[in-house]
Image: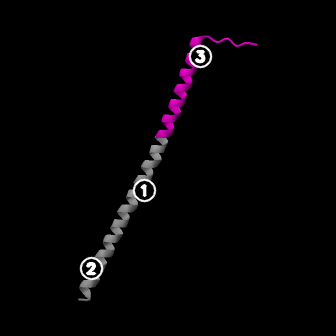
Amino acid sequence: MTLQVEFWTVVSFLLTFMGFVGGLAKWLFSKTEERQAARFASLEQALQQSASNWASWKKNLCDLKRIYR
Protein backbone atom coordinates (compact mmCIF):
# COMPACT_ATOMS: atom_id res chain seq x y z
CA MET A 1 0.00 0.00 0.00
CA THR A 2 1.49 3.31 -1.03
CA LEU A 3 0.48 6.83 -0.20
CA GLN A 4 0.98 9.40 -2.88
CA VAL A 5 0.89 13.08 -1.95
CA GLU A 6 1.81 15.95 -4.18
CA PHE A 7 4.77 18.13 -3.26
CA TRP A 8 2.74 21.33 -2.83
CA THR A 9 0.26 19.55 -0.59
CA VAL A 10 3.08 18.51 1.73
CA VAL A 11 4.48 22.05 1.67
CA SER A 12 1.08 23.51 2.55
CA PHE A 13 0.64 21.00 5.40
CA LEU A 14 4.07 21.91 6.77
CA LEU A 15 3.37 25.63 6.55
CA THR A 16 0.02 25.15 8.27
CA PHE A 17 1.64 23.12 11.05
CA MET A 18 4.42 25.70 11.49
CA GLY A 19 1.80 28.47 11.66
CA PHE A 20 -0.11 26.53 14.30
CA VAL A 21 3.02 25.98 16.39
CA GLY A 22 3.99 29.65 16.03
CA GLY A 23 0.52 30.81 17.07
CA LEU A 24 0.53 28.48 20.05
CA ALA A 25 3.96 29.75 21.13
CA LYS A 26 2.81 33.36 20.77
CA TRP A 27 -0.28 32.65 22.87
CA LEU A 28 1.79 30.94 25.60
CA PHE A 29 4.27 33.82 25.71
CA SER A 30 1.44 36.35 26.04
CA LYS A 31 -0.07 34.38 28.94
CA THR A 32 3.33 34.21 30.62
CA GLU A 33 3.77 37.96 30.18
CA GLU A 34 0.33 38.62 31.70
CA ARG A 35 1.18 36.52 34.74
CA GLN A 36 4.53 38.24 35.11
CA ALA A 37 2.90 41.68 34.89
CA ALA A 38 0.39 40.69 37.57
CA ARG A 39 3.19 39.42 39.79
CA PHE A 40 5.20 42.63 39.40
CA ALA A 41 2.11 44.72 40.13
CA SER A 42 1.47 42.83 43.36
CA LEU A 43 5.13 43.13 44.35
CA GLU A 44 5.05 46.87 43.69
CA GLN A 45 1.91 47.24 45.78
CA ALA A 46 3.48 45.26 48.64
CA LEU A 47 6.62 47.40 48.44
CA GLN A 48 4.60 50.62 48.60
CA GLN A 49 2.59 49.33 51.54
CA SER A 50 5.78 48.29 53.33
CA ALA A 51 7.35 51.70 52.74
CA SER A 52 4.20 53.36 54.07
CA ASN A 53 4.28 51.17 57.18
CA TRP A 54 7.94 51.97 57.78
CA ALA A 55 7.24 55.68 57.39
CA SER A 56 4.48 55.53 59.99
CA TRP A 57 6.74 53.59 62.37
CA LYS A 58 9.47 56.19 61.90
CA LYS A 59 7.02 59.02 62.55
CA ASN A 60 5.75 57.33 65.72
CA LEU A 61 9.29 56.75 66.94
CA CYS A 62 10.23 60.38 66.34
CA ASP A 63 7.10 61.47 68.23
CA LEU A 64 8.06 59.24 71.16
CA LYS A 65 11.60 60.64 71.20
CA ARG A 66 10.23 64.18 71.20
CA ILE A 67 7.83 63.39 74.08
CA TYR A 68 10.50 61.85 76.31
CA ARG A 69 13.10 64.60 75.84
User: What's drawn in magenta, residue-wise?
Assistant: 1-29
Q: Is residue 20 above or below residue 63?
A: above
Residue 59, located in which quarter of the rendered image?
A: bottom left
Total of numbered circles in the picture?
A: 3
Q: Which residue is mark 3?
A: 10
As measured in the structure, the alpha-carbon distance from the residue carrying label 2 to the one carrying label 3 is 77 Å
Q: Is residue 40 above or below residue 9?
A: below
- Residue 67 highlighted magenta (yes or no): no
As measured in the structure, the alpha-carbon distance from the residue carrying label 2 to the one carrying label 1 is 30 Å
How far across and down, in percent of the image, does residue 39 sit? 44, 53
- At label 2, counting other C-alpha atoms closer than 10 Å, the crowd grade (few under 14, some 14-19, many 20 or more) is few
How far across and down, in percent of the image, does residue 27 sit? 50, 36
**Disc 3 secondary structure class:** helix
On residue 67, the disc is none
How far across and down, in percent of the image, does residue 19 sit? 52, 26
Instruction: Identify the residue at horizontal 29%, vertical 84% (top origin).
Output: 64
Q: Which one is earlier in the sequence, the residue at label 3 or at label 1? A: 3
Relative placement, left or right, of 51 versus 25 is left
Relative placement, left or right, of 62 versus 46 is left
On residue 62, the disc is 2
